[in-house]
């Protein structure tokens, strides 16, 4: 029973984490991905960056990486919180099983 409750909590938490990402995480992922890529390009090129095709393509890839990282963090944190809640929910059942085992022994 414990494993089923924990696994269900993990799945529910990951789903909620994904939904939170869709509502609150896309814009920050877009922003930090593009800003981080632009700063990195400025440091690599040693000054201001001109909007050439290569620079724009690299910024688009940075945006994709930023959004993917935000999604991964949201889903993993949601799964961890869901797993913790699964353990909290299954704790009374574990205590009950331990008491029954102690009484039988």
Image (cartoon, rainbow, N blue to C red):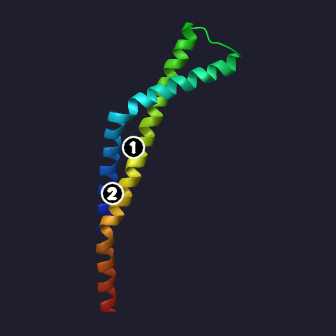
Q: Position of residue 52 (x, y in %)?
A: 57, 7
Say whether marks 2 and 1 touch (CB < 8 Å): no
Residue 88 percent coordinates (x, y):
34, 65
* Vertical arrangement, residue 101 with respect to residue 57, above or below: below
Quarter holding residue 83? bottom left
- Report how far apart the C-alphas of labels 2 and 1 lie in the structure: 15 Å
Q: Which mark, by number, is residue 7?
A: 2
Q: Residue at x 56, y 8 (%)?
A: 51
Query: Callout 2: few (<14), some (14-19), or many (20+) C-alpha neighbours within 10 Å?
Result: some
- Is 7 placed left or right of 55 in the picture? left
User: Which circle marks residue 17 in the picture?
Assistant: none
Judge whether 52 appears above or below 44 on screen: above
Which residue is situated farthest in the right direction here? Answer: 46
Label annotation for residue 75: 1
- Given residues 101 and 83, the one toward you in this image is 83
Q: Nearer the viewer, residue 1 or 93?
A: 93
Mark 2 secondary-structure assignment: helix
Q: Residue at x 44, y 39 (%)?
A: 72
Q: Give the image quarter of residue 45.
A: top right
Q: Secondary structure at mark 1?
A: helix
Q: Is residue 38 above or below residue 52?
A: below
């Amino acid at each position: 029973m414990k494993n089923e409750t924990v696994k269900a909590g993990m799945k529910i938490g990951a789903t909620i984490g994904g939904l939170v990402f869709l509502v609150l995480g896309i814009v920050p992922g877009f922003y930090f991905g593009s800003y981080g890529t632009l700063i990195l390009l400025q440091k690599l090129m040693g000054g201001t960056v001109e909007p050439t095709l290569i620079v724009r393509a690299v910024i688009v890839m940075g945006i994709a990486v930023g959004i993917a990282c935000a999604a991964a963090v949201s889903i993993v944190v949601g799964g961890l919180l869901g797993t913790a809640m699964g353990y909290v929910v299954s704790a009374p059942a574990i205590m009950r099983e331990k008491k029954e085992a102690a009484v039988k022994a």
